Amino acid sequence: MTVRRQTLLEDRVYDFIRKYLLVVPGSRIVVAVSGGPDSVALLQLLYNLRNVLKISLVVAHLDHNLRGDESTGDALYVAGLAQSLGLPFAVGGRDVKKYRQTHKMTLEEAAREVRYSYLAEVAAECGAELVATGHTQSDNVETILMHLIRGTGTLGLKGLLPLAVRHCGEHKINIIRPLLDITRDEIEAYCMNRGLKTRTDSTNLSLSPFRNRVRLELLPLLREYNPAIEKAV
């Protein structure tokens, strides 16, 4: 029997997944959940669509050990969320600061590399073919602007792709981004309307990371020239 989808956003995510052939029946997916609105909405949407898509889910969360009690609280929250949905989950911790010092890179780069490496390990351990992340259309716009500012060719202008392959040491993972056609505002409205409680990462308000400066300073300025700048990009 066909399972009826219940919300417009679920329909849009379902159609996006089908359009880009992100999953096939029987797929096992590691869902990266930080505890923020994007990843919590991603988990809920995939959970609601799991029967019609014929997929199984595993929740994964990495504590970067950068925010003390706040990040510990995030890990406990994600574990509780997975348990409330009856899903298997993995919660790990890594020393991102040490990795950054060892490899001589920015904190953003180190956190991204460590996070994907952890997700690849979880996928390998549970036999998952895919890793799903909560990147939205808003993230994609920010990424394209960051590429433009730094200097890029046509590859950089593509921004984030619905499906990407990433090599993490001895592991290779297939990353899917089911929310890439959904804006951050739509995600936050979905969480509010569904009564989904989410965690707030205090570092998202810091102007130190390049992405945050694009999000909090550049985009508001560009909206003064074109209120629909995200769609234009």
Image (cartoon, rainbow, N blue to C red):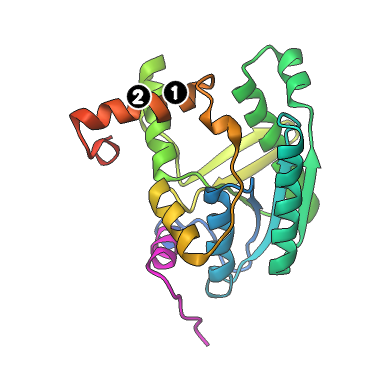
Asked whether 215 falls inside the magenta stretch, the response is no
Of the pair 175 and 62, the residue shown nearer to us:
62
Q: Which residue is mark 1?
A: 213
Report the side of 78 relative to 146 (left or right).
right
Q: Are marks 1 and 2 in contact (CB under 8 Å)?
A: yes
Q: Earlier in the sequence, mark 1 or mark 2?
A: 1
User: Which picture quadrant has residue 213?
Assistant: top left
Q: Residue 107, position in %: x, y?
A: 64, 21
Tag 1 secondary structure: helix
Please tell me which residue is depicted at 36% across the width and 26% down the height of the picture. Answer: 145
In this rendering, position of residue 232 left or right of residue 151:
left
Residue hosting label 2: 218
Point out the stretch of residues depicted in magenta: 1-16
Residue at the spot 58% in from the left edge and 54% down from the top edge: 40
Q: Residues under labels 1 and 2: Cα distance?
A: 7 Å
In reply to whether residue 6 is colored magenta, the answer given is yes
| Residue type pointed to by label 1 | Arg
Where in the figure is residue 18, as x and y percent of width and height? 43, 62
